[in-house]
Image (cartoon, rainbow, N blue to C red):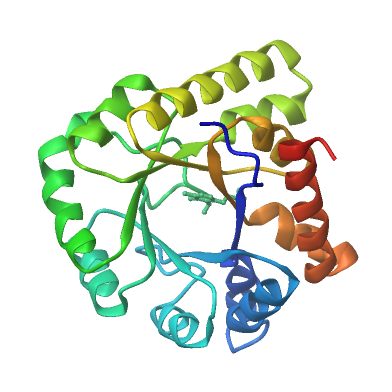
Amino acid sequence: MTRTTAPRLGVNIDHVATIRNARGGFAPDPVRAAKLAEQAGADGITAHLREDRRHIRDDDITQLKAALSVPLNFEMAATDEMQAIALRNAPHAACIVPEKREERTTEGGLGVLQDEARLAEFIAPLREAGSRVSMFIEADPAQIEACARIGAPVIELHTGTFAEAHLSGDMARRASEYERLREATRIATEMGIEVHAGHGLDFDTARLISVIPDIVELNIGHFLIGEAVYIGLESAIVKMRAAINEGRTGV
Ligand code: PXP
């Protein structure tokens, strides 16, 4: 079945916290940004509590959980510490991501295939606690099959390489990456896995990804927070929503 409704838009507010932390203190407040995003039409808020707490901090998660009316998608590494925090906060969704201390952002997808038994055990309590667990992976059929075997109900496809190809003007690479994402979405949907996508998306690439039938959710952060400097967060989100709708419905 091909969906005609537009993908949900999850707004990642990590980089509001990055700016706050550059000076210490309390401003700008990621919770205020999240509320504003919600008012502007975000369907969910995403926040990544990294091991080094470089942007989002523990109390941000507690406050987001208390303040939001839309679902919170908690991005986390597969560590005991993050599992305990997720179980305490019971977010609507938990997206499991790879994490390296030295990286600037989440580089590449999770190796579910390489760590299948541990990840199966790791996600079970999160699922039992009622969080919708997603695995952030590359558009690789072998990884999708591993996600199916461990019982992950959702995957999020890493769109970073596609977005990079678009920005660099490498249209041949963009086309092949797009095809990979499209095929991965088809395979996963056929297996009964819900498909999300994100990383590095802007108005143009979000529109293109929304064309792919059965992508159910996009998670977008860095570009929106950057765009907010020029046009405000609310306008950036409204424009993003329009781009996503246009991609899915053609209008
Ligand atoms: N989805 C996941 C799983 C991520 O790790 C990130 C980055 O934190 C995003 C989406 C958003 O990426 P960006 O900030 O580049 O839009």
Which residue is situated farthest in the front direction here? 1
> In the rendered image, which quarter contains the C terminus?
top right
- Asked which quadrant contains residue 155, the reply is top left
Q: Looking at this rendering, what residue extends furthest in the top direction?
A: 172
Picture coordinates of residue 149, whole percent (x, y): 18, 33
In the image: residue 185, left or right of residue 242: left
Residue drawn at point x = 46 percent, y = 69 percent: 72
Q: Name the residue: 67% across, 43% down.
A: 201
Number of marks drawn: 0
When the figure is inspected, residue 15 is found, relative to residue 60, above or below; the finding is: above
Residue 64 point in image, percent of width and height: 49, 81
Q: Where does residue 207 sit, x and y in percent of width and height?
A: 74, 38
Q: Residue at x 72, y 62 (%)?
A: 225
Q: Is residue 230 visible?
A: yes
16 w.r.t. 165: above or below: below
Q: x and y percent of residue 241 in the render?
A: 75, 54
User: Which residue is rendered at x = 57% and y = 44% of the image?
Assistant: 199
**Where 248 sits versus 245, above or below?**
above
Q: Nearer the viewer, residue 38 or 20?
A: 38
Residue 18 occupies quadrant: bottom right
- Residue 112 in view of the camera: no
User: Which residue is most to the right?
Assistant: 231
Specify the quadrant of the image occupied by residue 58: bottom left
Q: Is residue 63 left or right of residue 161?
A: left
